[in-house]
Amino acid sequence: MPEKSYDHKQVEMKWYERWGAEDLYRAEENSARPKFYVLEMLPYPSGALHIGHIRNYAIGDALARYKWMRGFNVLHPMGWDAFGLPAENAAIANQRPPREWTQSNIAKMKATHRRFQFSYDWNREVTTCEPDYYRWNQWFFLKMLERGIAYRKKALVNWCPQCGTVLANEQVVNGCCWRHETTQVEQRALEQWFFRITQYADELLADTAQLEGNWPERVLTMQRNWIGRSEGTEVDFHSEFGPIRVFTTRVDTIYGATCVRAPSRWWMRAPTKIQATSKKTASSPASTRSIHTAASVCPSGWRTSC
């Protein structure tokens, strides 16, 4: 008897239809089983899924399936990070209305996702550009504004002229935008929103102890370093440009200070008269010393006051 060839499309479609009909991966609202939550980064719907997406979501899928087989009630949702300039810029480049472009990409990406049969609970699907989702972002923001956690001020940012948006430090690669490798990133002083996350630094740092034994030590170290709590004192050095506030962890050696060095862009500011104060977490009392300085320009583009 001749060997029958393997028709992978026929086999895959058979199980694709059966698994879809049985709604296998729906999380139960009320269950006695232990809960487990798996969430990968939601994709930008600015194009089509590619092999990098598949690699990323295959890892989360393997973990979710493992927990299902271990008897957990797994919540494994999927959605679309569809609100913001990446989607708008892609729509502009393709000369289509942003909503139309975004919705069509979501439909294509979802079809690809479903053919891979990742273990998502599609009943929990979210689309961040829809009002039923972003109304809660607005609600959170207004609550933070009411409590003084959200505030506005001018600060220097990384600006990509091609994206027309601000970039995080991690999105600047060799001085250029991570999306546009030949576009130089500029430094701009812009009025923008900030969150007072430093109010929670001590709480966040203390609570990392609860993760010991469950998180890799290198990740905990990264988190603690990112929080960056340091005990010390803020001191003002007075110069012709106004007071220069410096933070030091060794205020006992401040009388040996002879120079203050800062990026040249700092000297373009107009600082106000302020007094030296200790940080709330300082382990030593505040110390104030007025050192009258004169500035000189360094070839590196920095200025030094000595």
Image (cartoon, rainbow, N blue to C red):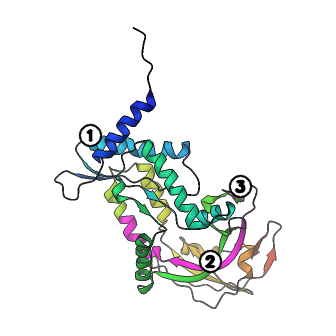
Q: Position of residue 162 (x, y in %)?
A: 72, 65
Disc 3 residue crowd, few under 14, some 14–19, many 20+, Cα 10 Å: few
- Can you tell which of label 3 and label 1 is closer to the viewer? 1
- Can you tell which of label 2 and label 3 is closer to the viewer? 3
- Can you tell which of label 1 and label 2 is closer to the viewer? 1
In the rendered structure, which disc, 3 or 1, sits on the residue that comes first in sequence? Answer: 1
In the rendered structure, which disc, 2 or 3, sits on the residue that comes first in sequence? Answer: 3
Q: Secondary structure at mark 2?
A: helix
Pointer 1 residue? 69
Q: Position of residue 265 (x, y in %)?
A: 73, 75
Q: Is residue 210 magenta?
A: no
Q: Position of residue 134 (x, y in %)?
A: 45, 72
273 relative to 89, above or below: below
Mark 3–mark 1 CB contact (< 8 Å): no
Alpha-carbon distance for marks 1 and 2? 65 Å
Residue 262 sits in which quadrant? bottom right
Pointer 2 residue? 255
Q: Between residue 257 and residue 76, name the one nearer to us.
A: 76
Disc 2 residue crowd, few under 14, some 14–19, many 20+, Cα 10 Å: few
For image coordinates 49% across by 55% down, the residue present is: 107
The magenta span reads 177-206
